Image (cartoon, rainbow, N blue to C red):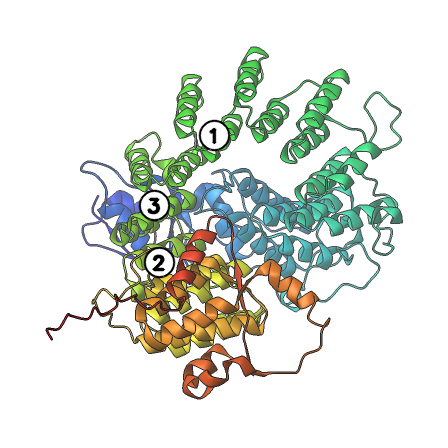
Amino acid sequence: MRSSFCWKTHSHDGYVQISGFTEDVPDFVTHNLRVGDRIIAVDSTLGKMWPVSTVDGVVSSVTTRLPGQTVQLKFERVVEDGSDLRVIDSLDTKSTSTDVKDSLSKSLIGAYSKYADSDTIVDGKGSKDLLARCRGILRRYISVHDPISERSSGIPALVADRVLESISKAEIPLDPVTLSLIMNAYISCDQPNDALRTFEGTTGVKVDGSNDEIDIDVDWHQVNGGIQRNEECLNLVTATDVIRAHAKLGDSVLVKKVLSAIEDDPDTVDEGRTQVWSTNVKPDTKCYNTVLAAIVNSNNLQDAENLFEKMCEPDQHPTCPQRNIATYNTMVGAYARAGRRKDAYDLFTTMRNHGFKPDKYSVTSLIKAATQEADFDAARNLLIDMKVAGIETDVVAYNTVIKALCLKNSWFEAKELVAEMESRGINPNSKTYGLLMNGLLRLNKPGPCLTLFESACADQRTASLMENVQLYTTAITASATLGDYERAFELVSRMSFAGVKPNIKTLTALMGSCISAGKFDTAMDVYDKIPNPDGYAQTLAIRAKCGMGLFEEALNSVSISIKSGENSLSGKQLMQSYNCIIGAALEQEEFLLAKQTMDNLLSEGLIPSKKSFQRIIDSLDLAPARENLEDSGEKRNMNEDAQFEYLLGVLDALEARKLSCSAPFYSAVLAEGARSGKLKRRLASIISLARTTEQNSIQLEENENITTVAPKEVTTWLGLWKNYAGLKDRLDDIQLQTIRVNINGRELRSVLYAERAVTFGRKKRKKTAPKRELPTLN
């Protein structure tokens, strides 16, 4: 298909608009399209219809089609209020002027026209008609919303924004149904804060269930200030939506406070008394189930059990909300996640005794409980029982077992289960492939992981499943493991071309591939594209800076991260960053910077781990204690005096905080002294005499006040190294630093071997035979 029109992207709404037509344009194009019409979606071999907002997206879909293949484009025309969509071809380009209070905004009409039927008439008479049209638009977008799709995940929230703009311009109050739909649109797009702001701005009631006045949200009122408050919007449905929004944020405390406000039950929450929202609002089973699910997701099983016990059985007098199958399924799932298999099975039996028929959610929870204990035979039997009992078996139940098998490194058994699933007519989804790919990575098989990904992309039946940011990220991680950064960049290009937006995990995986290939500057370029880097991304950036030789900048990055507190490094990530800087600096003979980094590490209250000491050993290429400690004649390029000074400085810094070093590090220091000989061997010998185990050092500290001795001059190991000539005759009069070493049973032999190599024994004189007097001739 040759393009018959020109387009541009300079509209204020960010759409691709037709700006003109070519000379050889067919008649049917000019008859159906007009200048200003929008291209909103494209359909090609790369996937199903998805929204487009750039010219590049449209061009790539057209130019990459296969020979003879058609490319479908979806157009949209913005119409003014009062237009009849049945005669849209006869519309002129003149706009009609209508009263703002009785009209939809242009953006809302544009959104509505995408899903409107051909016989729908847009008019703006009356607030009820406006709210009815808004509800219709919201229902349409919520019903077709696919939260898994990266391309359309936020569309319902955008529609909700435009609905609020239209109602604000009309200066009319929201009704409870419209408010609930708006809140659901935000919640479905993972924007619960917007849902809560809309509730407060509409009802004037604080969402935390307190009596406090609501905080004026300047941004919200600046856009939606025309919406009149309506206290009638506070009902059970909208209150339940508030609970769902808090649950989305993971705040179970506020969930319980809102329930307390609904019930007028201050005992529900122990953090102050809440107000009574409305005497007409009484919680029902759905409200209780929402609260129960929020508490379960916060891993507060005790509160979940208390709320479950508060609900009554369906065969009892309904003095409180009654339990239903969703209530039981939530609790069975909670017990399964907590590893309480017996409780899960007992509650399942209780549910059946009360007349509830198990569904796929009930049995899937039991499967989860079985896999928690690695009882895969029981899990497989439950899958068979579902088929026998006529319970619909879905991919979620199979994925539960597949995930457990992959975590146990039983990948081939997981693959067999996938084949069994397909034989039953259940197709694997994107999560199934993600589990299998991650299972291969756990087995350190990045090559087969990429092969599985590419084979699924090449299959028409599964190609659409692979258009997933998690799967692309896993494939990029496999490329990073192989050190193939070019393939990683190719995968990023492919996912962008497919309309899948990379997330922070994708970009960090791309950084890892660049670092593995030694492309540190490219890794930093990728890092600059991350808007809010997390701790792992910062750790990779520090590694990249070390690879570029920017040690001071890397150390400053660690210090800034510690002081800022936002997106800061975790304790493990801090140690990894410090170890990386120390190791890279030592490899470049930046001993002063390595010492400064160690001092910063200790000043932050961190304790060097075995990996820290091993990184020093590897970076300095120190000889193991059991190798030949004599100088083999191969001269290393490293400044050995500066290296030995650094090792002594580490011992002094550790003793300043009464910390122990690892046995391999202690042995390596002695081995280095024995290998170099002369003064270094003499100091290594003295160090071996000062060594004490961690247990003995504790005993010495406990008994140090028992006897009183005259204080001695304290000298550090670095001070002894620099002033040995003046101190060697007064070693008995000075106090040297204690060497604390953590030694386990397997390391004791190597420690003793290293100490024996630096021990100066008393030399024994060789016995000589007495001279025999030769006889003389008289």
Of circles 2 and 1, the one toward us is: 2
- The Cα atoms of the two marked residues, 2 and 1, are separated by 40 Å
Identify the residue shown where x is 32% and y is 54%. Answer: 513
Of circles 2 and 3, the one toward us is: 2
- The Cα atoms of the two marked residues, 2 and 3, are separated by 34 Å
Q: Position of residue 571 (x, y in %)?
A: 55, 61
Position above or below: 250 against 560: above
State the residue lying farthest toward the top.
388
Identify the residue shown where x is 49% and y is 62%. Answer: 575
Q: Nearer the viewer, residue 769 or 87?
A: 769
State the residue lying farthest toward the bottom.
726
Q: Determine whether, in the image, residue 57 is placed left or right of residue 15.
A: left
Disc marking residue 624: 2
In the picture, the quarter occupied by the N terminus is top left
**Tag 3 near tag 1, CB within 8 Å:** no
| Local SS, label 2 | loop
Q: Mark 3 sits on what residue?
A: 478
Position above or below: 380 against 657: above
Identify the residue shown where x is 82% and y is 32%. Answer: 309
Q: Nearer the viewer, residue 298 or 117?
A: 298
State the residue lying farthest toward the front.
778
Q: Nearer the viewer, residue 350 or 747?
A: 747
Amino acid on which the number 1 mark rests in the picture:
Leu
Position above or below: 165 against 340: below
Amino acid on which the number 3 mark rests in the picture:
Ala
Q: Mark 1 sits on what residue?
A: 405
N-terminal-most mark, 3 or 1 = 1
Q: Quadrant of residue 696?
A: bottom right
Q: Position of residue 751 (x, y in %)?
A: 44, 57
Q: Quadrant of residue 446?
A: top left
N-terminal-most mark, 2 or 3 = 3
In the picture, the quarter occupied by the C terminus is bottom left
